[in-house]
Amino acid sequence: MNKVYACSDLHGMYNLWAQIRDYCDETDTIYFLGDAADRGPDGVRIIQELLKDSRAKYLKGNHEDMLVTCISEYLMGQSNHLSWWIGNGGSPTYDALITMSEDEIRMLVQKLDSLPRSEWYRSPAGHRVFLTHAGTDLEFTEWELHTYFGRKDAYLWDRKHFGAGRPEGEEWKNVFQVHGHTPVQTERMIWRLKNPATPETIFYDEHKYNIDMGAIWSCRTALIDLDTFETKYFYDMETFKETCI
C-alpha cells in the first residue's frame, strides 16, 4: 500500500506487465522506465495500458524514440528510418500500429513523444533516486553530455556511464540511480567480467541499479521498491517453456 516501484524494458511481454499491474494496488506508484514495445508481440497493448493507468509514470525509452521517429515518417508516406527500427525489433509494433486509424496513431505518437526523459524521486527516508531509461553520469545534465561530450539523447541511448562511480561530495551520498536499457546479462559479460553471470537478479554498482532483465530472452522482469530497493521478480513460465529454453 502506497508503495513506489520501478520497472523497465518489458519489450512486448504482456504476461509480465499483467503480473506487475495486478501485483500493485490502487494506491501504489509505478515508474515505467521505457521500452514497452518491440521484439515481443504485445508492445502496443502494454503502451496503451501504461498510458491509461493512473498509477503509472511512464518515461521515454529508446524504443519509444524509434517508434515516434518511424511512425511519424509513416504518417507522411516516408520510410527513411524504418529498416533501422525493424532491425531493432520493431516489426511486431509496426504491424500492430498500421492496423489502427491514422487519428489513433497520431494520438499515440503525440503521447509517446511527450513522455518525460527523467524523473527524481525522494523517499520518505530522505534518499533521492534519479530515474531514466538508459542511466547516466549524474554530475552532468543531458544537455551537458550532448554539448560537451557529444553524447546525444544520453538518457535514452547512452552506455558510456558504465564504470563511472558515484559523484564525489557530501550531496551525492544519499543519491541513487535506477535505469534499464542494457540487459543485466550483457552488462555483466562486457563491463563486469569479475562478476558471475547471474541473469536472475538486477545489477547493482555502488549507486546504480540496472533493472533490465532482458525480458524477451529471459522471460523475467524485475519490480524494484524505490524506498527500500527490495526487488520482486516476475516470470512468464508459459513463454519460457515455449521459446526460452
Image: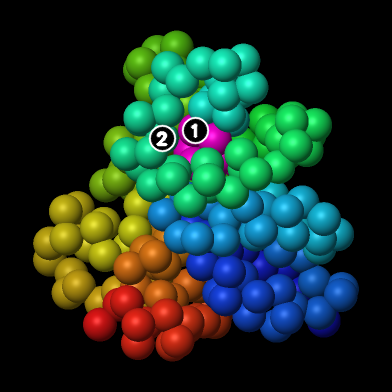
Dominant SS in magenta: helix
Q: How far apart are marks 2 and 1 (CA)?
A: 6 Å
Residue 85: which disc?
A: 2
- Say whether residue 199 is magenta: no
| Residue 171 is at least partly visible in this image | no
Q: Where is residue 111 in the image (x, y as percent from the top left)?
A: 75, 36
* Pick the front one: 163 or 60: 60
Q: Work out which quarter of the rendered image holds the N terminus and state it.
A: bottom right
The amino acid beneath tag 1 is Met
- Say whether residue 66 is magenta: yes
Residue 66: which disc?
A: 1
The amino acid beneath tag 2 is Trp
How many residues crowd mark 2 within 10 Å: few (<14), some (14–19), many (20+)?
many
Q: Where is residue 41 in the image (x, y as percent from the top left)?
A: 50, 60
Q: Nearer the viewer, mark 2 or mark 1?
A: 2
How many residues crowd mark 1 within 10 Å: few (<14), some (14–19), many (20+)?
some
**Magenta span of residues:** 60-67
Q: Quadrant of residue 232?
A: bottom right
Q: Which residue lies furthest to the left in this view?
A: 194
Mark 2 in CB contact with mark 1 (< 8 angstroms): yes
Q: What element carries label 2?
A: helix
Residue found 30% across the figure and 77% down from its top: 244
Q: What element carries label 1?
A: helix
